[in-house]
Amino acid sequence: MSSTTEGPRLNEKPLRTSTPEAGPTAPPSTCRVSTASRVASHLKEDIRSSAFAELLLVILTFCTGMQDATTFPDYHCFASNQTGNTVFLCLALILPQLNGESFITSNIGMALGLFLGAGWLTGQLSHIIGARKRWWLLLCNFVQSCFVLGAAGIQYRYGVEDRGATALAVVGLLAFAAGSQVVQSRSLAMTEISTAMATAAWVDLLIDQKLFAPKNRPRTRRIAFLLSLVVGALLGAVIYREVGSATAIVVSGAGKLLVTFLYAFSPAEKKRDESASPV
């Protein structure tokens, strides 16, 4: 038998050497979707009570002090202090002859009505949406800032008149913004920093059994609230005297815009680990 060398078969295809191929790269659209998903998840987080959130409420209190330092001398009413407005309204019912001298009834009614309406609307929507949702707090503060800056714009355009349509517009915008703002301290469970009303804070501070204790968070919050309100009112009065009320309201609106921006970075509630077994 003669040995023959077997060559390649006619019908057999030559083997191909496989070369490593680069893995599939994510298309740009996938990256964009991933970024959008992270942003959406961030906006849906619940903001927690923290020192950072306390700082934001203190800044809002400072802005409130500036507003009320201008609205009372200009319009003889308060945009956020509804205790005084309630008393004035009762006086207007019994002593109408004081209207125009000690107070202006139409301005008081506008301030009190829109403050209560804004508080009711914001509070009820917060129950439905989620009072601590980041996007909701961002939206509320942005709208409030626009209202405050809108009031300043009216003053720049038409000047300051203590009564009439322009006065009602300015008072209404500021009161609506204040009414929506005071809901936040309740939403964040930091009622010591109401951002507006000081009477309860003064009383709660003075009767605190641990007033002089080294560590007392509620006491510290009340002191920060009262100091920021006083400093804001003093600065607002200085700006009112030297420049005008419109500028003071603009500074207040700018402070509220700053708070709106900072809410994007406020710490969120820690997510519960659902996979962890209960102890």
Image: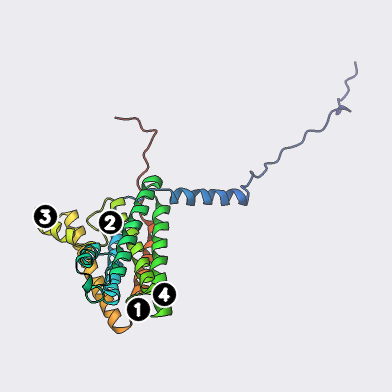
Residue underneath mark 4: 154
Instruction: Quote the CA–CA distance across marks 4 and 1.
Output: 11 Å
Residue underneath mark 1: 161
The earlier-in-sequence mark between 3 and 4 is 4
Residue 2 horizontal side relative to residue 56, left or right? right
**How many residues crowd mark 4 within 10 Å: few (<14), some (14–19), many (20+)?**
some
- Marking on residue 208: 3
- Marking on residue 51: 2
Q: Nearer the viewer, residue 2 or 247?
A: 247
Q: Quadrant of the C terminus?
A: top left
Q: Amino acid at mark 3?
A: Asp
Q: Nearer the viewer, residue 83 or 145?
A: 83
Instruction: Quote the CA–CA distance across marks 4 and 2.
Output: 36 Å
Instruction: Quote the CA–CA distance across marks 3 and 4.
Output: 43 Å
Residue 254 visible in this rendered orientation of the protein: no
Q: Amino acid at mark 2?
A: Ala
Residue 103 horizontal side relative to residue 253, left or right? left
Viewer-nearest of labels 2 and 1?
1
Viewer-nearest of labels 2 and 3?
3
Q: Residue visible at 25% across and 58% down?
A: 194
The earlier-in-sequence mark between 3 and 1 is 1
Q: Position of residue 116 (x, y in %)?
A: 31, 57
Mark count: 4
Outermost residue toward the bottom in this view: 242
Instruction: Quote the CA–CA distance across marks 2 and 3.
Output: 21 Å
Outermost residue toward the top in this view: 1
Badge 1 element:
loop
Viewer-nearest of labels 3 and 4?
4
The earlier-in-sequence mark between 4 and 2 is 2
Instruction: Quote the CA–CA distance across marks 3 and 1.
Output: 43 Å
Q: Position of residue 68 (x, y in %)?
A: 27, 70
Q: Quadrant of residue 217?
A: bottom left
